[in-house]
Structure formats: structure tokens, C-alpha cells
Image (tube, helix red, strand yellow):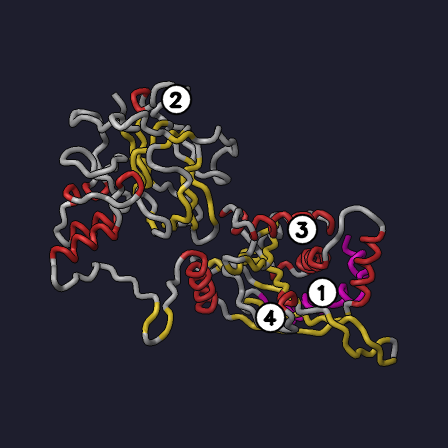
Amino acid sequence: MPQVLEFKLPDLGEGLTEAEIVRWLVQVGDVVAIDQPVVEVETAKAMVEVPCPYGGVVTARFGEEGTELPVGAPLLTVAVGTATLPEGAGAEPEAASGSGNVLVGYGTDHSRPARRRRVRPAGSAAAPVPAAPAAAPVPAAPAAAAPAAPAAVAVAAGPVPVISPLVRKLAKDNGIDLRGLAGSGPEGLILRSDVEAALRAAAAPAPAAPAVAPAPVTAAGERIPLKGLRGAVADKLSRSRREIPDATCWVDADATELMAARAAMNAAGGPKISVLALLARICTAALARFPELNSTVDLASNEIVRLPSVHLGFAAQTERGLVVPVVKGADRMTAEGLSAEFARLTELARGGKLAPADLTGGTFTLNNYGVFGVDGSTPIINHPEAAMLGVGRIVPKPWVHGGELAVRQVVQLSLTFDHRVCDGGTAGGFLRYVADCVESPTVLLRSL
């Protein structure tokens, strides 16, 4: 006799309490293996694939794509046991105990099982997942989260073919019996439109408005929910402004020699060195001289905590918005190593494949806003860090060089810092050292 197990949205770590369903990777009726990814979700930090700890046949999914679920909410149910497999389907599902793993790329291994198999009925008299009798050992669950069996038409007994808990709630709030509805969705699934049609029929001739009517556009303009990544950014920046008394100083620097040094490095062969990597190497050297800026403020103990390593965050613009991947141990890396790590993390960011661990733990941020064609900025510090170095575009400008007016490659550098960790003298000293290294890269050799 198959056993139906409920898989809930696991603890995603890093203080995350909810996630939005981006894409289901399995359908009702699919056979899944232990640790097979079943859904892709978007948290406030990244998009991750969630693996199922059970092997068996998917009997129900909870939540449509775009639905936001809290940690601990049901994701899907899996029928575990040989009776759930069709004849000739192959190996038996894994044991019901599961693997104990949590997330792909976060607290679990990276192995990938074979492609899932779609269970299809052999004939009109056979169903891919037979309904379990009343005595079957099914874990207790709320009525709104009952497993949904794939069926063409709702029947008087057994699970109701509904995936979305929102549809169940809409029907419950309006007194609609789902067992009396024939679903218009795939394999007879009952959709929101089916419930709304029943509401209109019950209230004829006046149509009944749905319990939750989407209204993205109002007379005041379009309303965009502050959730997911955008909501997390809003919360973090607001907290930074509330807690950190920040100040900004800036200076123009002649980057002609830095650009010439980079061209010489790349002409010598080997992996290409990016401008961002050279600036990062300068940053880590400056932080070694001014460790006050590689720190954080512990409000609970009223202490400044100077951090032993530099975990360098860098701003990366993606289709999902601005994210800040973190290069761990940047102070122990060469310009070549930094360049490779920037490229790797940027590629993951653009593909939406960064793990939450890639976006946390930063101690200092390098923000190259020059890629947007602007010269200067007063950025908000990436809480709970103490400082951020901003770099504008590098453009030809008139500059006095060697006592004569010349056209040089000029860049504006800005430093936004937490005034609690240091005064203007320290911040100015840090920025001046960075500018000196940009103008004369040989200065950097003294600290290597």
C-alpha cells in the first residue's frame, strides 16, 4: 500500500522566511527520485532549486507559479511505495526516509539523478496514481492542503483535483463545493476560473466578483509589490539609512598609467586582467593600511568589530535587478585570481544561479557605476558593512601632467563610510592611497 508523504518548503537559511515559486520542475503524476529538484523558487537573495527528500510519484502540488509561500508551507505530496509505479516503470522509488538534504547548491550535494519519467495511464480504465483507501496511512494535514489526485473529473470521494491553495480558499470563503465542479485544467485540475464561473452562476444575473481581484493598474498608476529581491534591497537600504551615519568624500584621479599597466599585463599573455580586478587589488591593499574601514558595528554590545579578512562585494546589474556577489578572501588573491572570480560570479548572477552564500558575508563593497556612463555617486552603504568605494567612468579629460595641460584618462573615486568607525582623516587617507595607486601603480608594489 503506498504511503503519501508531504514535502514542505524547507528552511532556506540566511534568515530567509519565504520564497516565491518561479517554475515547477515536475508535474502531478511524475516519478521523482530522492534529491531530484522539483521546484525553482526565488528568495530575497537568489533563485534556487529545491530537491525533494522522497522518491515516488507526485500526487499534488501546492501553489501556482508566482505564489509566495512561507517556510514550512506544503510544496507537494509524494506517494511512496511500489504500488505507485506503473507496470514496467523501472526501479522502485527510494526509501520513504529521504535523504535529509535541503537545497541544491546550499547544504546538499550537487549530484543530479536521471531525468524524471512522466507516468501516463495505459488506458481509460487505469489512473497513474490510484486513490488510496480511507485506511491508508496518510499524514494528517489541513483540509486546505489535501493531496490532489490527477483525474479528468472531480468525484464524490477521494482527493479533490486542486493544486492551488488559493483556489481552495476562494471556494471555501464563498461556500463552493469543489467536489461538484469539473476542472478545465490539465488532467481535470480545478482552476481559479472554474471557481469564479461557479460563483457567477450562483449569483446570476449579477456576476460575483472574485475574492481577490487583481488590480495592477489604478487611477494613481501602476502598483508594483515590494517583494522578493526588490523588497529585500528596499529593506536593507532603509535599514542602512536608519542605522548608519554615513559621509562621502571623493577625488579625481589620473588613471592613464593604470590603463597602460593593464594593457601591458594583457599583452604579456595569459588570462586577461579586468580593470575591476586591478581596482579590487588596490582596495585590499588600502584596507590593509586602514583596517578601520573593514569592520562592522555591533549595536548589541556597542562595539566596533574589525574583521580579519576582506570579503569583497561588487555590484552587478542583472535582469532581476542589482545584486552584490561576494568574493571571499579577496585580500589573499592576485589580480589574475580576482579577475577570474569576478567573471565567474558575474556569469552566475546573470543566469540567476547565485547561491545565497554567494550573496552574503561581505565586509567591503566596490561599486563600479562607471559602466552606466556616470562620473560620480553617493551610494548607500551595504549594511552591515562600514564603507563602499565608488568608481566612475574613465574618460579623456584635460589634466595638468608634468606641468603642462594634456588629455589624460581621468576617473572620479568616491568613498562612503560609516562615521562611527572612523573620522574624516582615516577616510581621506584611504581614498588618497587608492588614488595614488591608480595614478601610479608602482605605489602598489610597496605593499605586495
Mark 2, other Cα within 10 Å: few <14 / some 14–19 / many ≥20? few
* Between marks 3 and 2 in the image, the one whose residue lies nearer the viewer: 2
Image position of 53 with respect to 341: above or below: above
Q: Amino acid at mark 2?
A: Ala
**Cα–Cα gap, marks 1 and 3:** 15 Å
* Between marks 1 and 4 in the image, the one whose residue lies nearer the viewer: 1
Give yes or no for contact between labels 1 and 3 (Cβ–Cβ under 8 Å). Answer: no
Q: Amino acid at mark 3?
A: Asp
Q: Could you say whether the residue bearing mark 4 is in a helix, strand or loop?
A: loop
Q: Which residue is mark 4?
A: 423
Looking at this view, is 60 or 401 the one in front? 60
**Residue 183 showing in the rendered view:** yes
Q: Could you say whether the residue bearing mark 3 is in a helix, strand or loop?
A: helix
Per the image, is 182 magenta?
Answer: no
Q: Quadrant of residue 100?
A: top left
Q: How many numbered badges does the structure rendering display?
A: 4
**Cα–Cα gap, marks 2 and 1:** 64 Å
* Between marks 2 and 1 in the image, the one whose residue lies nearer the viewer: 2
Question: How far across and down, in percent of the image, does residue 326 sit?
Answer: 58, 52
* Between marks 4 and 2 in the image, the one whose residue lies nearer the viewer: 2
Residue 434: assigned label: 1
Q: Could you say whether the residue bearing mark 1 is in a helix, strand or loop?
A: helix
Which residues make up the magenta segment?
422-448
Q: Which residue is mark 2?
A: 89
Question: How far across and down, in percent of the image, does residue 157 sit?
Answer: 15, 33
Q: Amino acid at mark 1?
A: Val
Give yes or no for contact between labels 1 and 4 (Cβ–Cβ under 8 Å). Answer: no
Mark 4, other Cα within 10 Å: few <14 / some 14–19 / many ≥20? few
Q: Amino acid at mark 4?
A: Asp
Q: Could you say whether the residue bearing mark 2 is in a helix, strand or loop?
A: loop
Residue 331: assigned label: 3
**Cα–Cα gap, marks 3 and 2:** 54 Å
